[in-house]
Image: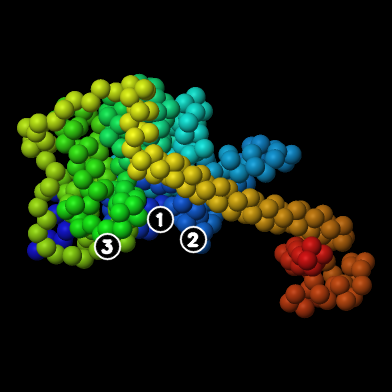
Amino acid sequence: MATLLEQLREFTVVVADTGDIQAIETFTPRDATTNPSLITAAAQMPQYQSIVDDTLKTARKELGKDADESAVVTLAFDRLAVAFGLKILEIIPGRVSTEVDARLSYDTEATLEKARYLISEYEKAGVSRDRILIKIASTWEGIKAAEVLEKEGIHCNLTLLFGMHQAVACAEANVTLISPFVGRILDWYKKETGKEYAPTEDPGVMSVTTIYNYYKKFGHKTEVMGASFRNIGEICELAGCDLLTISPKLLDQLNSTEETLPRKLDPEAAAKMDIAKIAMDKAIFDKMHQEDKMAYEKLDEGIKGFTKALETLEEMLKERLTRIEGETRVNNAAADIFRVYDLDGDGFITREEWAGTDVVFDAIDINHDGKITPEEMAAGLGAAICLVEA
């Protein structure tokens, strides 16, 4: 029998919810989506250290040695998001989602500026904008920014979507894709009611089902991508959804489970349903948002969470930048000192050329061959600086 993952792929596009290149290579999804938390996790893996360091060095070089480290890190984050996006696009056949700074969620113009910049970086790297989804929080301001971007041919993924008012506004703005957060909705209801929910009555599953049926009933082209799953039961209940973005852990469970998977969501069935059309403007949006306690709280919490994740990544990048520039200062100082003592320019310093004490010479001459190489000088100077700083 085919696995659940194999059957799911027959009627739903599977997206990898990860920034881990190796996981993407393992599960070969069509699309992939990232966020600052996923990039932070990936950036700490040894195999991606060079990407992070090279991105920081390039940002510093571009902004200049006198630029504030916060400006360097901000530029580096955008470049890093694109760098990971480019690596992912080498593997997948479809699209990658790249997130706009969550701190801009209530600023339409700033969101537009950031989105255009990210697209320009991809295009400079030779990637068509058709392969990129700009991920934006589903605030009214974010939705309005997405509406403008879509008209410019910049496709958008509206995230942190919890309420029907957000879904309707996104559809009427003709955004490419929305990401309703199944698991986070379930989390809220479990905390609010103290109940446990079976997959068939899961509030997150029911929310996505309602949105999907509404879109298909009224012919909206916006794609629905269920996100933020807590278990494979939720995923199975949404089989047939346009797309589902799934973590590597749950992808592995789906891929190792063999049982029949019936299709649950179907556009033809939705088209026959008796569903009322919902009018939408800012006043209606605001009213519905205030009245939907779950959506109000989860959107606010989500933006704060994405912001915190970004700030954590920025702090990590600042630490890396400090380390890199410390190493650069040591290497430059070591090179200067080496040139002074290498009197004959033969590439090493002998004891006769050394003007310091024998104790220092012996400490720097790591392999004790009577010669100090440039590498030994850099290592010795670096150790000395560390002792002074300590």
The residue tagged 3 is 252
Badge number at residue 45: 2
Q: Is residue 223 left or right of residue 332?
A: left
Q: Residue furthest bottom?
A: 368
324 and 10: which one is in front? 10
Mark 3 vs mark 1: in front:
3
334 and 22: which one is in front? 22
Q: Quadrant of residue 150?
A: top left
Quadrant location, the N terminus? bottom left
Residue type at mark 2 is Met
Secondary structure, mark 3, is helix
Label 1 to label 2: alpha-carbon separation: 9 Å
Quadrant location, the C terminus? bottom right
Contact (CB < 8 A) between labels 1 and 2?
yes
28 and 150: which one is in front? 150
95 and 194: which one is in front? 194
Q: Residue 363's x, y, as percent?
A: 81, 75
Secondary structure, mark 1, is loop
Q: Is residue 288 left or right of residue 372?
A: left
> Which residue corresponds to the image point at 70% horizontal and 40% vertical from the top-left?
68
Label 2 to label 3: alpha-carbon separation: 20 Å
> Which residue corresponds to the image point at 80% horizontal and 55% vertical from the top-left?
333
Q: Is residue 319 left or right of residue 189?
A: right
Name the colour scheme: rainbow
Badge number at residue 20: 1
Residue 83 visible in the picture: no
Q: Quadrant of residue 345?
A: bottom right
Q: Earlier in the sequence, mark 2 or mark 3?
A: 2
Residue type at mark 1 is Asp
Residue type at mark 3 is Asp
Secondary structure, mark 2, is loop
Label 3 to label 1: alpha-carbon separation: 14 Å
